[in-house]
Image: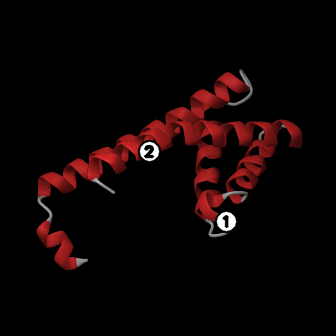
Amino acid sequence: MHGYLARVSPATLSATFALTLLAWAFLVLGTIAFLNSAAPNTLRWEEAMIVFVFTSIGGAIPALPGGLGTYEAAAVLALQRFGLDFNESLALALGLRLCNIALTVPWALLVATRSGT
């Protein structure tokens, strides 16, 4: 890794860092927007952020590819902490997963086709 970083210019590293922050910002805003539109006046933005943190951790737990199942379980757990029942939480968790896929897959395909991978 040390050799790779030595060959990458500071401008490339800065651009990569900025794009990574932008991608995370879009995911956070997407989570807040989805939860506010799917369940209006149910969660404050701070609570939606906590749901985002829970789902990020749940999606990172190595189980099935893409955190399938652990992501949704983490979302249900977080949403139930804020007073939603299991069925509402599960529906929101599945909708949130679809929303995140819709936000990330087009960008991933664009990057993959532009980079030749």
Looking at the image, residue 49 sits to the left or right of residue 105; the answer is right
Query: Taking the image as drawn, is residue 85 in sight?
Result: no
Q: Quadrant of residue 18?
A: top left
Out of 52 and 4, give the one closest to the viewer. 4
Q: Quadrant of residue 80?
A: top right
Q: Position of residue 94 (x, y in %)?
A: 73, 41
Element type at mark 2: helix
Q: Position of residue 43 (x, y in %)?
A: 70, 31
Residue hosting label 1: 64
Task: Tell me the quadrant of the picture where the C terminus can be found.
Answer: bottom left
Give the amino acid at mark 1: Leu
Element type at mark 1: loop
Residue at the (60%, 36%) spot, across then down: 99
The label nearer to you, 1 versus 2, is: 1
Q: Quadrant of residue 49?
A: top right
Residue hosting label 2: 24
Q: Which disc is residue 102 wearing?
A: none
Q: Position of residue 22 (x, y in %)?
A: 36, 40
Q: Residues within 10 Å of mark 1 (few under 14, many from 20)?
A: few
Q: Position of residue 86 (x, y in %)?
A: 87, 43
Residue at the (58%, 62%) spot, across then down: 60
Give the amino acid at mark 2: Trp
Task: Tell me the quadrant of the picture where the N terminus can be found.
Answer: bottom left
**Residue 69 drawn above or below residue 37:** below
**Spatial CA span between label 1 and label 2:** 22 Å
**Residue 22 drawn above or below residue 44:** below
The earlier-in-sequence mark between 1 and 2 is 2
Q: Residue furthest bottom?
A: 2
Q: Residues within 10 Å of mark 2 (few under 14, many from 20)?
A: few
**Residue 21 drawn above or below residue 40:** below
Looking at the image, residue 42 sits to the left or right of residue 111; the answer is right
